[in-house]
Image (cartoon, rainbow, N blue to C red):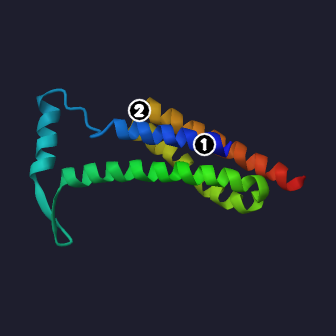
Amino acid sequence: MLRIASVVTLLFAVGHSMGAPWTPVDGPAPASVVEAMKSVTFDAMGSSRTFWDFYFGFGVSISIYLMVQAAVLWLLATLAKTQPNSVRPFVVILLVAYAANVYVTWRYFFLIPLALSVIMVICLVLALVASRSRIGT
């Protein structure tokens, strides 16, 4: 299940990255918002930045974190075969994060990332169940 979760996370990362710059600009109103984000500068701890810098930078950061998470899940899957008890706390942390992400995605985004988040929750729950049965054997 952790390998499946790894692949789902990789799909999440690819989809998120392909969506860059994450803002549909298909009309004058959205274009004016994007232009305002790009033109309004402010001081961020000694660096001159725009809201667009933060928006775009956070989007790229999320793609990077998703790719790293996919790699970590792949490595945890290998470790889970021999040390399921050691892997459980990591799976629980990821499960809590993805459960929260289900709500955030439902509230603020759209169907595809919501579906991937729900699939991740299912994979992580099944991984926890599998690790318990592996410990008992």
Residue 108, percent across and down? Answer: 38, 40
Instruction: Please state which of residues 76 and 23 is positioned toward the viewer in this rendering.
Output: 76
Mark 2, other Cα within 10 Å: few <14 / some 14–19 / many ≥20:
few
Residue 136, percent across and down? Answer: 88, 54
In the image, taking residue 94 as reference, residue 31 lies left or right, namely left
In the image, taking residue 17 as reference, residue 41 lies left or right, namely left
Q: Tell me the residue at 15%/48% (across/down).
A: 37
Disc number placed over residue 110 in the picture, else none: 2
Q: Tell me the residue at 28%/53% (across/down).
A: 57
Q: Is residue 95 visible?
A: no
Of marks 2 and 1, the one in the foreground: 1
Is label 2 in a helix, a strand or a loop? loop
Instruction: Please state which of residues 23 and 11 is positioned toward the viewer in this rendering.
Output: 11
Is there a contact, CB below 8 Å, between mark 2 and mark 1?
A: no
In the image, taking residue 48 as reference, residue 20 lies left or right, namely right
* Farthest right residue in view: 137
Residue 130, percent across and down? Answer: 77, 46
Quadrant of res 46: bottom left
Q: Amino acid at mark 2?
A: Phe
Figure check: 109 above or below 87: above
Q: Tell me the residue at 32%/53% (across/down).
A: 58
Mark 1, other Cα within 10 Å: few <14 / some 14–19 / many ≥20:
many
* Farthest bottom residue in view: 46
In the image, taking residue 67 as reference, residue 99 lies left or right, namely right
Q: Amino acid at mark 1?
A: Ala
Q: Earlier in the sequence, mark 2 or mark 1?
A: 1
Residue 70, percent across and down? Answer: 54, 48
Q: Is residue 41 visible?
A: yes
* Residue named by callout 1: 5
